[in-house]
Image: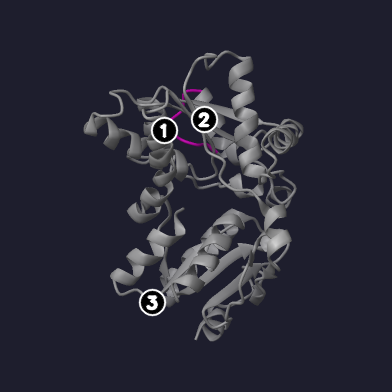
């Protein structure tokens, strides 16, 4: 949802290439979008994300260039290395949570939900890494309240993370506006073993103005930590009941809804919008040959100079 408006906005501003750091899902979406929009893209990702980086159509290594960080580096390392490429080599980044096009693209899901339901839901559930999806839903809801036709209230945000690495949940449940080192203590080499690695972001926009903390505060929100066992059980429930496979982060969101029901955080008659942020990969494999995005460079993050990166980007 966020890739098309971000790419279009960049092209409207005369930007010919952007860089995105990813743990897999967002990078895949931007790669697919770059094909249809004939746009140049640089992807920086940890090696553990390789299996999640593919497209349904052939791409040129000249238009989409993947740089991977060797084993032992995580998503946050990719973010930092991407920032150094941007700073030193002048490659524009996509902007993350600070990019209004990206937030509005993600908010489209909320608008579509409201259009279908006919009113603002009382509760909104989504799994988050940076939390940008939660911010986007909150911003979309505020616009609808100003519009006045769909309700005069904001939905309660229910945001979820991996139980093993849930820095925002920990800070929120302890009443802290800022993350501390203790919240981020999971070693980098253990990040790849998380059930939903794409949710593991060490630098989320939690404390900034307009960030996750503010969104949760204004919506009387709640946060959840989900175990791998519960997430896998939720994924099976979705497959059995809806006949579609869902990706790991979406399974975390479904499991958090189950938690909320069991703890009576939501009523049985509440209107609920559950954001399934991805799925249908098994169905895709039946219709398409999924083409892996091959890296143009693998770096160690410390020994690889930016000159080597510059060489593959020219």
- On the image, the x and y values in percent for residue 192 come to 72, 51
Residue for point 54% across, 41% down: 128
Q: Label 2 neighbourhood size at 10 Å, few (<14), some (14-19), many (20+)? A: some
Q: Which mark is residue 213?
A: 1
Q: Position of residue 90 (x, y in %)?
A: 40, 75
- Any mark on residue 171, and which? 2
- Indicate which disc, 1 or 2, sits on the residue closer to the N terminus: 2
Dot 1 falls on a residue whose secondary structure is: helix
Nearest to viewer (mark 1 / mark 2):
1
Q: Is residue 64 magenta?
A: no
Q: Which residue is mark 3?
A: 16
* 178 in magenta: yes
Residue 48 visible in the picture: no
Foreground: disc 3 or disc 2: 3
Specify which label sits upstream in the sequence, 3 or 1: 3
Relative vertical location of residue 16 with respect to residue 181 in this rendering, above or below:
below
Of residue 198 and residue 74, the one placed in the foreground of this image is 198
Look at the numbered discs 1 and 2 and tell me whether their residues touch, using CB distance below 8 Å. Answer: yes
Q: Nearer the viewer, residue 285 or 105?
A: 285
User: Residue 296: percent from the left, percent from the top?
Assistant: 63, 79
| Sequence-earlier tag: 3 or 2 | 3
Asked if residue 194 lies left or right of residue 270, the reply is right
Mark 3 and mark 1: Cα distance apart in space = 34 Å
Specify start and end residues of the magenta stretch as a single range: 174-180
Q: Provide the secondary structure element on which disc 3 rests.
A: loop
């Amino acid at each position: 949802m966020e890739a098309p408006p971000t790419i279009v906005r960049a092209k409207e501003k005369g930007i010919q290439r952007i860089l995105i750091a990813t743990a897999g899902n967002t990078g895949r979406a931007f790669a697919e979008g770059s094909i249809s929009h004939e746009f140049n893209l640089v992807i920086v990702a940890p090696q553990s994300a390789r299996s999640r980086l593919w497209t349904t159509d052939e791409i040129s290594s000249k238009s989409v260039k993947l740089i991977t960080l060797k084993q032992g580096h995580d998503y946050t390392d990719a973010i930092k290395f991407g920032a150094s490429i941007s700073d030193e080599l002048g490659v524009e980044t996509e902007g993350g949570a600070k990019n209004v096009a990206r937030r509005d693209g993600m908010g489209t899901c909320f608008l579509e939900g409201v259009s279908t339901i006919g009113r603002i839901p009382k509760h909104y559930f989504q799994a988050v890494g940076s939390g940008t999806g939660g911010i986007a839903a909150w911003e979309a809801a505020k616009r609808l309240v100003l519009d006045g036709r769909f309700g005069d209230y904001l939905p309660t945000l229910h945001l979820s993370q991996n139980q093993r690495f849930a820095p925002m949940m920990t800070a929120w449940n302890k009443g802290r506006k800022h993350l501390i080192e203790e919240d981020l203590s999971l070693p980098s080499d253990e990040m790849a073993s998380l059930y939903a690695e794409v949710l593991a972001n060490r630098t989320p926009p939690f404390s900034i103005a307009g960030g996750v903390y503010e969104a949760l505060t204004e919506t009387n929100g709640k946060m959840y930590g989900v175990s791998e066992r519960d997430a896998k059980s939720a994924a099976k429930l979705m497959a059995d009941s809806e006949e579609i496979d869902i990706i790991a982060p979406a399974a975390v969101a479904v499991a958090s809804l189950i938690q909320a029901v069991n703890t009576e955080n939501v009523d049985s008659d509440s209107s609920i919008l559950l954001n399934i942020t991805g799925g249908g990969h098994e169905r895709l494999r039946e219709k398409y040959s999924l083409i892996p995005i091959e890296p143009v460079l693998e770096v160690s993050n410390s020994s690889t100079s930016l000159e080597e990166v510059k060489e593959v980007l020219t």
